[in-house]
Image (tube, rainbow, N blue to C red):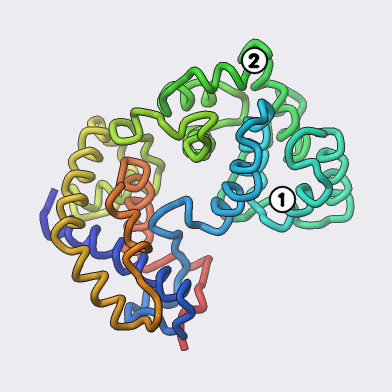
Amino acid sequence: MDKERIREFCELAFKRHQIYVLKKAGVPKPWTKDRILRFYRFCNVFRFLDKTSEWIIRNAIEPNEDNQELWKTIIMCRYISKIETLQKLKDAKCLIGNQTEAYNILRKMQQNKEKIFTNAFIVNSKTDSYGWTDKVSYLFNLLFEIRKKMSTQPDTIIRCTNTMEKLYYLLIDLPGIGPFMAYQYTVDFTYSTRYLKKAWDKSTWTQLGLGAVRGMNRLLYGKASNDKIPNSIELTKELLVEWKRFVSSDIRRWIKETQRMVENIKVDPFFYYFQHLDLRDVQHQLCEFDKYERGGSKKRRYNGGF
């Protein structure tokens, strides 16, 4: 990989995170001079800081770490990925347990033509061989299929997997779950102390989605390509090493620069996450790097200007 391209990859992560810090601190916009970052929407550098992930962690995962039905809630929350819908389920006390009530609420929303699910990514619900033809039916049948596949003990089996890779391959065999969603669900389980918070392969295994593959090909060959990368995990681990090296040499500069732009707030804690990078972060950043190289997501504008 070209060293200059790696530097651009790392610098982009700092620039994006600086926007997050300034916005969080209440600094008036614009938060950056970079026109692409100013006017086009990007995910946060760290997935768990995105609004939906943050909501899921605080409202669904953390309060229910002792509940053996938590696995259902994690799947349901990520599949829906729309905070307004999730809040409605929480208010009705059926975000965890009481699936009948959750089903009834979603079905009523569907009948009223209310927006239930996110548009942030495409999820498959067309599994006609199972007779599932809409997203609400698919979601609850998926939970049933997970229980059946895992011998009616999904909580125990997921807790015993110990690794992201094992859980990923358990999930990807299920109807309607492709590589993208299997990975998204798996990452959500790493936010739970009940399940994969201590998974030992967070720095040794990942699954590159299409955007991440394109991002890696940009680093390798200078241009986007959907071509699969045979040794993608090894290359991703190499990139993690380079990113950590960059953080070690440059993080103080970024903290000082950001501190000059913020009054009455210590910004060091906001950059703490860079000290604990793993392959989940590399995969996530590769996807956003590809988006940046394309000039931003033309479908998702961002009001970060004046």
- In the image, is residue 166 above or below residue 37? above
| Label 1, residues with CA under 10 Å away: few <14, some 14-19, many ≥20 | many
Secondary structure, mark 1, is: helix
The amino acid beneath tag 1 is Leu
Q: Which structural element holds mark 2?
A: loop
Q: Position of residue 294 (x, y in %)?
A: 35, 63
Picture coordinates of residue 109, whole percent (x, y) = 84, 51
In the image, taking residue 202 as reference, residue 112 lies left or right, namely right
Residue projecting furthest to the bottom = 306
Residue 86's disc is: 1
Left or right: where does residue 91 sit relative to residue 283? right
112 is higher (above) or lower (below) than 100: below
Which residue appears at 65% of the width and 32% of the height?
70
Give percent across and percent down for residue 88: 79, 53
Q: Nearer the viewer, residue 62 or 71?
A: 62
Residue 212's disc is none
Q: CA distance from mark 1 to mark 2?
A: 25 Å
- 1 in relation to 49, above or below: above
Residue where numbered disc 2 is placed? 153
Q: Amino acid at mark 2?
A: Gln
Q: Quadrant of residue 194?
A: top right
- The percent position of residue 126, horizontal first and vertical second, equals 68, 34
Residue at 51% x, 57% y: name it.
Answer: 50
